[in-house]
Amino acid sequence: MTPEIAVLIPCFNEQETISAVVSAFRTHIPDATAFVYDNASTDLTIERARNAGAIVRSEPLRGKGCVVRRMFADIEADIYVLVDGDDTYDAASAQKLIAALVRDSLDLVSAVRVDSTRKTYRTGHRFGNWLLTRLVAQLFGKRFSDMLSGYRVMSRRFVKSFPALSTGFEIETELTVHALQMRIPIAEIGTPYRERPPGSSSKLRTISDGARIMRTIAYLLKEERPLAFFGALSASLALLSFAVGVPVIVEFLRTGLVPRLPTAVLATGLMMLASLSLVCGLILHTVTRGRIEMKRLYYLSIPIRFRREQ
């Protein structure tokens, strides 16, 4: 049975590039249906996307995460190709990514950007991607080398089991952590990555969007690994309590007096908070495990409708 393939292109003000992106993917994946979701653009993006042969829909809530959430909810397909509309990703690599997904029974194949020059994207973006990828690898598992790639091929059961809670560019982080948490079969494949066409500028703001991604990582750590999050908080509070309280204890053992009563009360309070934090982590760990089990069961209940090569 031939799989139904959907190319999903979240789009903002991209009139200079959207026609080329849609045309390229329709050429290299002729059996696919291209969907362009416009996110309140103020130029000719919608008209040009439609003229290039894409099905155009709109999402009024601003932010890439809102667009991806709407696309995943609305579109029914067997294989999903998610790609940015800025004409920096290689459409010719789509067949290779799809073939790997089908051949190896994967749920996610992520394109690793291989740029020909260091000018392809800004130094701040390059360093931020490296730093955030390393951080996620340390916290959730080292299976991705390019966490913020905007070019991914996904199975139906991955897409339909993904909660998509983010609103902005942190959606790539959420996609990555979801794949790591669910321990689904994934792969990365290097694909060419080129400079933006003249007149096109990146919507990603290095500092502000980087800070939002960091907050998202912290939030996902609390939600998906609460014992590690609250355990680290508990250890920090306990160490602070010892640092404050040990001199008081030493003074008491030496003289039998507690001359710094406020310090003793502070140390006691910090230790109580450390204990409460650890208990919260243990309880939430049990709750999270049950939630992950339910997500896993739902993920497994979604049938795979494309044929794998033997």
Image: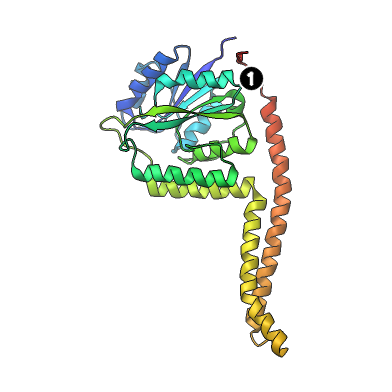
Q: Position of residue 302 (x, y in %)?
A: 66, 24
Q: Residue at the spot x=49%, y=49% of the render?
A: 214
Q: Is residue 47 visible?
A: no
* Tag count: 1
Q: Position of residue 89 (x, y in %)?
A: 39, 27
Query: The disc labelled 1 sits on which kind of residue?
Result: Ile
Q: Residue at label 1?
A: 304
Is residue 153 depicted above or below 239 in this figure? above
Q: Residue at the spot x=59%, y=26% of the render?
A: 107
Disc 1, SS: loop
Camera-nearest residue between 89 and 213:
89
Residue 246, quarter of the rendered image: bottom right
Is residue 192 depicted above or below 55 in this figure? below
Q: Residue furthest top?
A: 1
Q: Position of residue 159 (x, y in %)?
A: 57, 28
Residue 162, quarter of the rendered image: top right
Q: Position of residue 98 (x, y in %)?
A: 51, 20
